[in-house]
Image: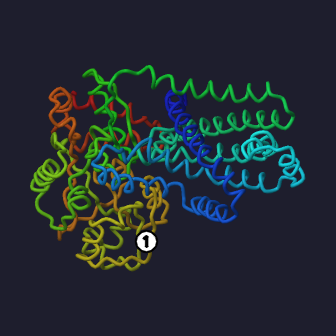
Amino acid sequence: MSDAFVRVPDLLAQHVLLAFSALLFGLAIALPLAVWSARRPAVARVALGFASLVQTVPALALLALFYPALLWFSGLVGGGIPALGFLPALLALTLYALLPILRNGVTGLTTLDPAILEAADGVGMTAWQKLRIVEAPLVAPVLMAGIRTAAVWTIGAATLATTVGQPSLGDLIFAGLQTQNWSLVLAGCIGAAGLALTVDLLLALAEHGIRARRRLQVYASLGALLLGLLAALAPALSSGTKTVTVGAKGFSEQYILARLIGERLTDAGYAVRYREGLGSAVAFGALAAGDIDVYVDYSGTIWANEMRRDDIPPREAIVRGVGDWARETHGVRLVGPLGFENAYAFAMRGADAERLGVTSLTDLARVAPRLRFGTDVEFLERLEWRNVRDRYGLRFASQNAYHPTFMYRALASGAADVIPAFSSDGRIAADRLTVLTDPRQAIPGYDALLLVAPARAEDDRFVAALAPLVGRVNVEAMREANYRVDRDTDKDIPAEAATWLAERLGL
């Protein structure tokens, strides 16, 4: 448990900076908009309608939508705008913070006693004097209630920023869910909940101070919030070292390899940070745009998803083709294959495969209408699935999507009969699964490739630190490292598995 909480302070600081920045931007937009809306009913209808519409979009989808939008805008203005990390998370959370502030502000202003406003007009106050001296103090308690709601919402939603590469307490939650390390999940949840409750308490004290006209209480509460923000900002202000960003997708093998890469770069004198939990759809784009400096992807993933190739040449040809394409079109450098393959491999419970006489995808097509297909959330949208489905004529009785970790659980529990497992996953042997052969070669090779961003492509020192990894990671060692993280008992965290892997390979 203590290992999980070691990461909390750094991630908490990042979480505070993101959530507070979004809340401040939300206030900067919502407060003048609330005043305008209170004066113009037509503006209120449009503003509140838009803010309400934003709330109907799931936070995760809103974050993801900013990635292609920022990529497009960056291309439009000649580049330089990050599509991952702080900016998309800030924009999405700012939009999420608008509604409670705006609605409470408009409600407070439009329900003020008309006699008070008439009295203000009667003594000759200007519009600005009336707002500052009369309306603002009367509306402040109602407005503070909206700000408290927005703060709690923003702090909670900020955990999802992990999916667009912005470090937050969500890093612990997502990594813990993937590796079934509940200590990590608990550490992330406690950190986020504790932060939300603390901020809400301080804002509640400020709200009470406003109602009771106790200025000292208001200043003390807001001062405590400011001190918290400055404390979170301090590490960023004091760091003058150029930091290298190691990317990783959201599963155990990627977390382990990211730590393996990070350890080598740290030993070479680089300051390292991690952006983990990236989706396959954004990881390569993040590398090409320079949002991350290095990560491991798989040849078949880039071949099918990025290059849109549906032919299946030999593995070596795919690796060579990916390297050439990445360099020529994006300036990305292929340092080399790590030495193992992690391909999609259709798997069944061993006893069921034997009972049904299924050893290949051809056999599976015969019995598929009686079976339930459990898959990860992205496989059904990938070209590889369409290739397999069309070449073998696969039609299952049902198809359900799971998080990759729970996909194996679904198979073990009987909720699914077939899954697209990962060939380097240690759970295949541990769970005694039968992997089906692919006689029609519908699935391309998935060699693990070490890729570096264009800005690092000619950095000899950087590449030299990584080069010893090329061709050194065999699939047996990778399976064992994965299993050390994924097993139910005596689990390793990814950093421990990476250290074990380095020792096993003599790195």
Question: Which amino acid is tagged 1?
Answer: Gln
Residue drawn at (34%, 38%) of the image = 256
The answer to whether residue 217 is left or right of residue 258 is right
Give 300 or 323, whichever is nearer the viewer: 323
Give 180 or 289, whichever is nearer the viewer: 289
The answer to whether residue 143 is left or right of residue 507 is right
Give 408 or 30, whichever is nearer the viewer: 30
The answer to whether residue 166 is left or right of residue 242 is right
Q: Position of residue 462 (x, y in %)?
A: 20, 29
Residue 47, picture quadrant: bottom right
- Counting every numbered tag in the picture gives 1
Q: Is the residue 239 above or below the residue 408 in the image?
A: above
Q: Is the residue 369 above or below the residue 117 in the image?
A: below
- Mark 1 closeness class: few <14, some 14–19, many ≥20 residues within 10 Å: some
- Disc 1 is placed on an element classified as strand
Q: Position of residue 423 (x, y in %)?
A: 28, 53
Q: Quadrant of the C terminus?
A: top left
Residue drawn at (79%, 24%) of the image = 216
Q: Position of residue 486 (x, y in %)?
A: 42, 44
Residue drawn at (37%, 21%) of the image = 240
Return the residue at label 1.
399
Residue 156, picture quadrant: top right
Q: Position of residue 473 (x, y in %)?
A: 21, 39
Q: Quadrant of the N terminus?
A: top right
